[in-house]
Amino acid sequence: MTLGFFWDSLFGLVFGFMLSAVAQVVVGRRAMRALLGPGVRGVVNGAAFGIVASACSYGAAAAARGFFRKGADIRSVFAFMISSTNMNVAIVILFWSLLGWKFAFAEFFGGIIIIAVVALGVTLLFKPAEIASLAAQMPPEAPRARVPECLQCGMEGDEEHAVEHEGTTYLFCGSRHENEFRANPQAVLGAHDAEEDERSFEPAALRSPQTWRTIFETAVGDVQMLRNELFTGFVVAGFAAALVPQEWLSGALRAVGAVPIVGYPLLLAVGLLLAVVTFMCSMGNVPIARFLAMAGIPLGANTTFIYGDLLVPPLVGIYRKSFPPKAVWAFLGLFVVGAMLAGAVMDAIIGNVLGGVTMGSMDLNDRFTLVSNVVVVAVVAALALFAYRGRAPVARMEH
């Protein structure tokens, strides 16, 4: 079961970490602030980007971390994270095929409700100046062990002009830049950081093998930092899926829903709680949501169950490494409120329209997973070949 969940999530994981690395390496802070800045426009852009940038919950969290580090507004980052896991095109198509149009409709438009609740809640809980200073509250990134590009000109450095400074080895393209760095390293690093703050999006850089080497190194560093959370999430999800019968899940939801007066709100909350304790990501929840729908669980509780994949403990651990503590707890509380509200509203609007859900075949899900995983592995392999071919000759020529 663990390997099965990993296979189902492979495309989203690779896509999310690579997207984060590209944003950190190629997109400057000015461009990120313009695209995912404060205000309604930034939230809409973040949600729209998430809809087309399909990722599993772990990959989305990794990408969101990279955006936030680059200067994106926290509300826009949260909007991206919610939409990329619950509203993206791929998952909406799968839900439509497997559980019918009602479930797909509820999943998509319920996500809009959650984004609105989270964005509005953060705006009310934090002052504008406090929101703007959230990124500064994060500890600085661990220094890279090796910086292969020359800080002054951006070209690939040479081993003959390597300088070690505070645990990082910097390579320079020639003796002039090397000597300038040795004479005043803080001035060179400060000028580089200032240039980074003003740098915009540079798509032309993606044609350089050096850029892709840096992207791969950044992605690997992010995976290493989050490896414990990823490992824990997949293993515990595998145990939960293997040991907890789906009949028990449906029975527990039915028992909660039968409680007088408060049964329905409790049902929505237990749907979220079940997602938390099963540790499954959004793609892993698809077959369980299908089973619960066949068992007659109300659409509202089923949608909150799907939404709850963003609340699993390993993801909370990633949030705590990615965002300031106050922002993390605000997001978790607002997300719970938004998910329960979205489940109730969607259930009230379309829960009883046209009878029950129309079930499709799980074969479509399996085919989509196979094709997407093969494609993403092939693309990454091709990019790695492009990035690392002829590395030494390029350095000598530049020198």
Image (cartoon, rainbow, N blue to C red):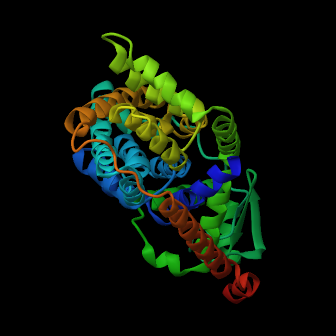
Residue 326 at least partly seen: no
Figure disc tally: 0
- Decide: is 365 above or below 382: above
Nearer to the camera, 21 or 235 = 235
- Name the residue rendered at 38%, 26% in the picture: 268
- Name the residue rendered at 51%, 51% in the picture: 56
Q: Would you say 152 lies left or right of 292 here?
A: right
Give how far across and how far down residue 201 sits, in percent.
Answer: 40, 67
Residue 26 at least partly seen: yes
Choose top left, top right, bottom left or bottom right for residue 235: top right
Q: Would you say 145 lies left or right of 197 here?
A: right
- Decide: is 212 above or below 279: below
Choose top left, top right, bottom left or bottom right for residue 351: top left
Give how far across and how far down residue 314 sits, in percent.
Answer: 61, 36
Give how far across and how far down residue 4 sits, in percent.
Answer: 65, 52
- Name the residue rendered at 49%, 47% in the picture: 286
- Decide: is 288 above or below 252: below
Nearer to the camera, 256 or 66 = 256
Outermost residue to the top: 260
- From the image, which quarter does the C terminus lie in? bottom right
Give how far across and how far down residue 1 sits, in percent.
Answer: 68, 47
Nearer to the camera, 99 or 41 = 99
Choose top left, top right, bottom left or bottom right for residue 13: bottom right
Nearer to the camera, 207 or 181 = 207
Outermost residue to the right: 160
